[in-house]
Image (spheres, rainbow, N blue to C red):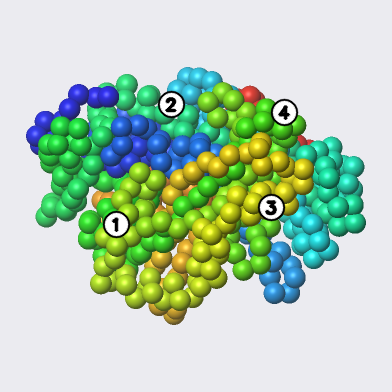
Amino acid sequence: MSPSLPTSSSVDVILIGAGIMSATLGTMLKELQPDLTIAIFERLDLVAAESSDAWNNAGTGHSAFCELNYTPQRPDGSVDISKAVKIAEQFEQSKQFWSYFVQKGVLPEPHEFIQQVPHMSFVWGDNNVDFLRKRFDALIQSPLFQGMQYSEDRQQLADWMPLVMEGRDPHTSVAATYMPIGTDVNFGSLTRTLFERLQAMPGVSFHLNHEVEKLKQKPDGTWRIRVRDRAADTSRKVYGKFVFIGAGGGSLPLLEKSDIPEGHGFGGFPVSGQWLKCTNPEVIARHGAKVYGKAAVGSPPMSVPHLDTRQINGRKELLFGPYAGFTTKFLKKGSYLDLLKSIRAGNVRPMLIAGAKNLPLTRYLIQQVRQSPQDRLNALRDYLPTARAEDWELEVAGQRVQVIKKDAKEGGVLEFGTEVVAAADGSIAALLGASPGASTAVSIMLGLVQRCFPEQAATPEWQAKFKAMIPSFGQELASNPALCEELRAKTSEVLELEAVAQ
C-alpha cells in the first residue's frame, strides 16, 4: 500500500472503492494520460472483497449467450434481442481491453482471470422450447452469435451437459443452445492484478481501510472529501478535480452525500444472495458449462437460475443459484442501517411507488427467505435430477442494490441494470446497480470517460489511445461481420482461448 497521505492533499482523480470498476477506470485513465495523479480509497482491508469477488456476484463473463432474461418475449410471441446484442458487443470491448494489457505485460497470465467455458441455455416444456427456438433463430442472424448451436435431441444434450440430462423424465420436451466460445471470468483476480499495476505507477496512492465520510464541491469546481483511516481512527481531507464513486452497494449513500442535483430521487433496494456450492470432486469434474434456465413466472429477472462452472483460486468449482434473500445492508460487510440511512425526502415517493408496483418481487423474496434446505435441493434437481444433499453446501454470496429512480410518468421505477449518474459539469460520477456490471465494466468506463472528460476525449491523442485499447472503438461489431470475426480471432489468440466458432 502507498504511504499515508498528508493531512491535506490534492490529486487529479479520486477513486472510491477498490472493485473492478475503479480498477478499470484507473487503468484506462493512466493509459490515456500517464501524468494524472490518482488517490484510491477502499473501506475494507482487501481489494475486490465485495461484488468483484468470485464467491460473491461477479464471475460469469456475461456476454448474453445464455442469459434468457436479456432476450424477453414480446406480446406477439417474437423475441427482442436488442439488449443481448448490446451486452455481447460490450463484452467484446472488455476482451479487447484485456488483450491490449496482456500484450503490454500488465496482465501476464490470461488463464489466471479468464477461461473458456461453454455457455448454454436450457429449458423444458413445450412453451419454453418454442421460446428458445425463436430466440436462437433471432440471435443467429447477428455476427456476435455466430457459432451458436441449437438442439432438441436428447443425445446431443447429454453430450453437452451429461449431468443435467441424467435421470431426467424422458417424456418432457427439452431444448438447449450451446455457445462454445463462452468464458468464465474471475473478476477478483483481474481486479487485484490491475490494482497491483496501478500501485506501482508514479502519481498513484492506494489506501485500504479508509472510508470516505463526506463529499463537498468547492466554488472552483474541485471536490473536498473527508476520509477516515479506520485503523488509526484519524481523518484527513483530500481534494480532487474528478471523483468516481465505484463502491458497489455503497455508492448510493455517497452519491446522496455529494448532493448533486442529478443524484436526487435515487433510491436502492438491497437483495442478498446465496449459492449451493458443490463439494464432491467427481460431480464437479463431470460438468463443464454455464447452464442458464428461465426464471419462474412472476419472479424477477435477477432470479434466473444457473448451474455454473467457475475457476476460483486455481480450482474448478461448481455453483448453483442464486437463491435470493432480503437484508437492509447495502454491502456484504455493511450495516443493517444502510437502507434506513439512504432514505431522503426526495426519494421516499419513488421508493414507495416502485415498491407498490413490484409486489411480486416482495413475495418472491419472502418465499426465498423461507426456503428450507429441501426446497433449495428441489430447485437444484430441476437442473441436476440426480443431485444429493450431501454433495452441496450453502455459500453466502454478495449484495446487490437495485436502482430505484424517479420517473415522470410512473413516479418511481425499479431498474435491473447498471446506471452511471454524473454531475452536469462532469466533475463527479457514481455507478449504481448490478448485473451485468463487471462484464461490461470496460464499456461503462469508456462511456464515463467520454462523458466526464469531453474535451480531452475528443483530442486526436485520446482518440488514438481509445482505438489502441479497444480496436472496435467507434464501430459496431453487430453490423460488421468481418471486423467481428477478425477481432474475436485476435482476442482469442491473445487471451489463450479456443478458436472463434464458425
Residue for point 14% across, 36% down: 233
Q: CA distance from mark 4 to mark 2?
A: 31 Å
Spatial separation of the CA atoms under disc 1 and disc 3: 34 Å
Q: Circle 4 sits on which residue?
A: 282
Estimate the x, y position of residue 64 in percent, counting from the top left: 63, 49
Question: How far apart, in angstroms, are the residues tagged by discs 1 and 2?
Answer: 33 Å
Q: Which quadrant of the figure contains the N terminus? A: top left
**Above or below, 220 relative to 493:** below
The residue tagged 1 is 337
Tell which tag, 3 or 4, sits nearer the viewer: 3
Could you tell me the amino acid type at mark 3?
A: Asn
Specify the quadrant of the image occupied by residue 95: top right
- Quadrant assignment for the C terminus: top right
* Mark 4 or 2, closer to the camera: 4
Q: Which amino acid type is marked by label 1?
A: Leu
Q: Are marks 4 and 2 in contact (CB under 8 Å)?
A: no
Q: Nearer the viewer, mark 1 or mark 3?
A: 3
Nearer the observer, disc 3 or disc 2?
3
